[in-house]
Image (cartoon, rainbow, N blue to C red):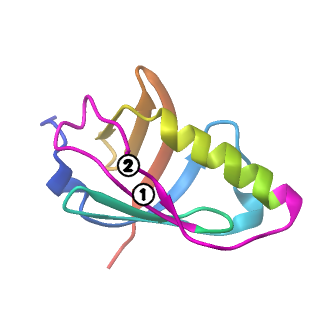
Amino acid sequence: MPATTATDLNGPWIVKKIKGIDLEPFGDLRFDFDAGTLYGSSPCRSFTTTFGADLQNLMFSPVQMGGGLCDEEAMIIERDFMQQISLVNRMEMDEEGRLVMYNFDQPLLWAKRLAD
């Protein structure tokens, strides 16, 4: 399987699973990649961050958060979600076309491309 490039990620994705976080109460969490920028939604707020072209050695930086508040439980889950995102240091697409974000060899987040 060829290496995943930043261009391969361009477009919308739906987050399917995050290690240690129950996503059931939040419906669809969505990511949009565009030319080295990641736009996304956490349970309560939106965020934007940038990353370099090397997907095997990256850091999302800086992360800019939009305004918004939720109930306490949702804010705690959002904090946990953003902590997982901050740990990501590589990402690739697996053989099934899912995006997997890792902290070294530990998978943290799985997403599926949003169908057109």
Cβ atoms at labels 1 and 2 below 8 Å apart: yes
First reached walking from the N terminus: tag 1 or tag 2? 2
Q: Secondary structure at mark 2?
A: loop
Mark 1 Cα-neighbour bin, 10 Å: few <14, some 14–19, many ≥20: some
Task: Examine the structure image and report whether residue 61 is included in the region drawn in magenta.
Answer: yes
Instruction: Say the numbered circle drawn on residue 112.
Output: 1
Amino acid at the residue labelled 2: Arg
61 up-or-down from 47: above or below: above
Residue 16 in the image: x percent, y percent? 55, 54
**Which portion, as a residue range, is magenta?**
46-73
Q: Residue furthest bottom?
A: 116
Question: Which of these two is toward me, 80 or 108?
Answer: 80
Q: Which residue is mark 2?
A: 98
Label 1 residue SS? strand
Neighbor class of circle 2 (other Cα within 10 Å; few <14, some 14-19, many 20+) is some
- Kindly identify the residue that appears in the image at 50 percent across and 39 percent down: 86
Residue 39 appears at what percent x and percent y? 40, 65
Q: Specify whether residue 81 is painted magenta.
A: no
Q: Marks 1 and 2, Cα distance to the nearest angstrom?
A: 5 Å
Residue 4 shows in this picture: yes
At a point 29% along the width and 35% down the height, the residue shown is 58
User: In this rendering, is residue 33 above or below 101?
Assistant: below
- The image shows residue 85 at horizontal and vertical percentages of 51, 43
Query: Is residue 17 shown above or below 43?
Result: above
Q: What is the three-letter code of the residue carrying label 1?
A: Lys
**Mark drawn on residue 12:** none
In this view, the residue farthest toward the top is 105
Please identify the quarter of the rendering in which residue 116 is found.
Answer: bottom left
Q: Is residue 104 left or right of residue 108?
A: left
Q: In this rendering, does residue 18 appear at all?
A: no
